[in-house]
Image (cartoon, rainbow, N blue to C red):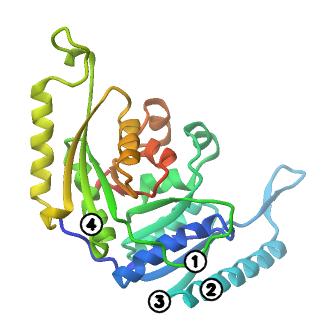
Amino acid sequence: MHVPRKLRSIVVPVDGTTFGEHAIPVALGIAERAGAELILVHVHAPLQFESRANRMFPDGVLDEWLLRERRDCLNGLVRRVAYATTVRVRSILVEGPEISERLCRIAALTRADLMVMATHGRGPLGRLWFGSVTDALIQRSPAPVLFVRGSDAPARLDPAPAFRKVLIPLDGSNRAEDVMPAALAVGQSSNAVYTLVRVVPIQAEDSFGDAPMMRPHPRREEEAAKYVTRVTSRLSLDPARVRTCTVFDDRSTADAILRYAGHSRTDLIGLATRGRGKLSRFLHGSVVDQVVRKAAVPVLVQRSPGA
């Protein structure tokens, strides 16, 4: 039985720019509906300069000044957010060169039930060479992460509207269902409607008869429909709030999910991931990676236990 998890603590990483603040309205709306605490986290990476001996050393004076500035900015942001809400808002400022590692540690120490973060959605080659906090959190975050598309425009700190249509793609495995508790928790206080979709790739061997290939073999179609029905029966939801769909597509699974999300006017996509490494995703592709990068709506990612 899939039951929603209780949201008590929501972590929002901020980087001192307006871009990162675009995650706050979404997190704030969820926190108000769930009665959760909001924690704004900033990771300060110490500056380093290269000496003539080609050695790296920190400039302590400049770092101290930047750290004070970051602390003042973070405190100011907490005041601005607290002014717009009744939920508890606090901040954490930590230092360290590895931002994603510090964020994962904070999420574990605060027992965060959800992390909400703005993302650029850069391509796989950019992540492979330059690294990406988004990429690392997909692999290692102990809490589910809700990725929101950021912007350089000023962010309004008012609580964002509730998610009304949640799309959960399934692939027939138990791991794909690991995102269920988090997705149910995000939408439980807004009477969201959940659509469970099974994407069935159309392959050459599926063609039968002389008619153009539009659907897979009937046996595969029947198996997909039965699978989605079994998952639905394990949800602790009013049946009226659950819909099922089987999508047949000859494109990639990610593209099929994104196309269905657009047609159905989905406002949240929930996915589970095995947390594969960067090179593996670059060479073979990852459905989660592509959906997070291309989706026009927020994407909730849950790393499968033991992945």
**Residue at 30% across, 65% down:** 182
Per the rendering, the mark at residue 88 is 3
The disc labelled 3 sits on which kind of residue?
Answer: Arg
**Residue at 46% across, 55% down:** 297
Per the rendering, the mark at residue 184 is 4
Please state if 265 lies on the left or on the right of 296 as rendered.
left
For the residues bearing labels 4 and 2, Cβ distance under 8 angstroms: no
Please state if 243 lies on the left or on the right of 305 as rendered.
left
Of tags 1 and 2, the one toward the viewer is 1
Secondary structure state at the residue bearing disc 2: helix
CA distance for labels 3 and 1: 15 Å
Secondary structure state at the residue bearing disc 1: loop
**Residue at 19% across, 49% down:** 244
Lower position in the chain sequence, tag 3 or tag 1:
3
Q: Which residue is mark 2?
A: 80
Of tags 1 and 4, the one toward the viewer is 1
Residue lying furthest right = 52
Please state if 40 lies on the left or on the right of 153 as rendered.
left
Q: Position of residue 24 (x, y in %)?
A: 54, 73
For the residues bearing labels 1 and 2, Cβ distance under 8 angstroms: yes
Q: Which residue is mark 1?
A: 157
Of tags 3 and 4, the one toward the viewer is 4
Q: Residues within 10 Å of mark 4 (few under 14, many from 20)?
A: many
Which of the two residues, 141 or 293, is positioned nearer the viewer here? 293
Q: Is residue 267 above or below residue 176?
A: below
Quadrant housing residue 212: top left
Q: Is residue 16 above or below residue 200?
A: below
CA distance for labels 2 and 3: 12 Å
Lower position in the chain sequence, tag 4 or tag 2:
2
**Residue at 76% across, 64% down:** 47
Of tags 3 and 1, the one toward the viewer is 1
Lower position in the chain sequence, tag 3 or tag 4:
3
